[in-house]
Image (cartoon, helix red, strand yellow):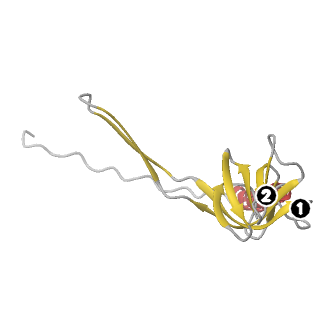
Amino acid sequence: MFAIFKTGGKQYKVQKDGVLKIEKIAGNAGDVVVFDEVILTADDKGKATVGAPLVKDVKVSAEILGQDKDDKVLVFKKKRRHNYRRKRGHRQQVTWVKVQEIGTGLTAKAGTGAKAAPKKAAAEAKETAKEAKASAKPAAAKKADKPAAKKPAAKKTPAKKTDKE
């Protein structure tokens, strides 16, 4: 059985236990995501179901294997006879996923998934930011409590003597 689903503005043909590289989605390694924009499904006998525009109730469940950066793409611009050359590079963020199931009534495992992960990550980021602020305040207060030690004035170099004198 295989399916064609849409994510990140692209369409992917997948089958069970297939590994593919897609545009970056939210989530950590081990999380399970469910793609519900399935365009076409086909069983082992060759019977295909085409959606108009999507196949109803069919979803693709996949596990996130990891987040990565794709190969570098070089962008080179040139205008001849104008001494104009610009070279830029770009590495796209990608996510590696392994397809677990294709079928109806699929949901992400308890407490994981694309929708739950960003909320958890945002909450953890807020907590760490609060902890960092709390730990930074006492350090700043300690510095303010100590009187600042004055540095001695810099010595001036004597004026250079000239031969005319």
| Disc 2: CA contacts within 10 A as few (<14), some (14-19) or many (>=20) | few
Amino acid type at circle 2 is Lys
Image location of residue 67, percent across then percent down: 65, 63
Which residue was labeled with disc 1? 106
Question: Quadrant of the rendered structure where residue 80 is?
Answer: top left
| Disc 1: CA contacts within 10 A as few (<14), some (14-19) or many (>=20) | some
How much space separates mark 1 and mark 2, taking CA atoms? 21 Å
Amino acid type at circle 1 is Leu
Q: Nearer the viewer, residue 154 or 14?
A: 14
From this view, report whether residue 9 is shown above or below residue 78.
below
Residue at 82% x, 52% y: name it. Answer: 36
Image location of residue 44, percent across then percent down: 76, 66
Image location of residue 133, percent across then percent down: 77, 56
Residue at 74% x, 56% y: name it. Answer: 26
Q: Circle 1 sits in a helix, a strand or a loop, which is it?
A: loop
Which residue was labeled with disc 2? 47
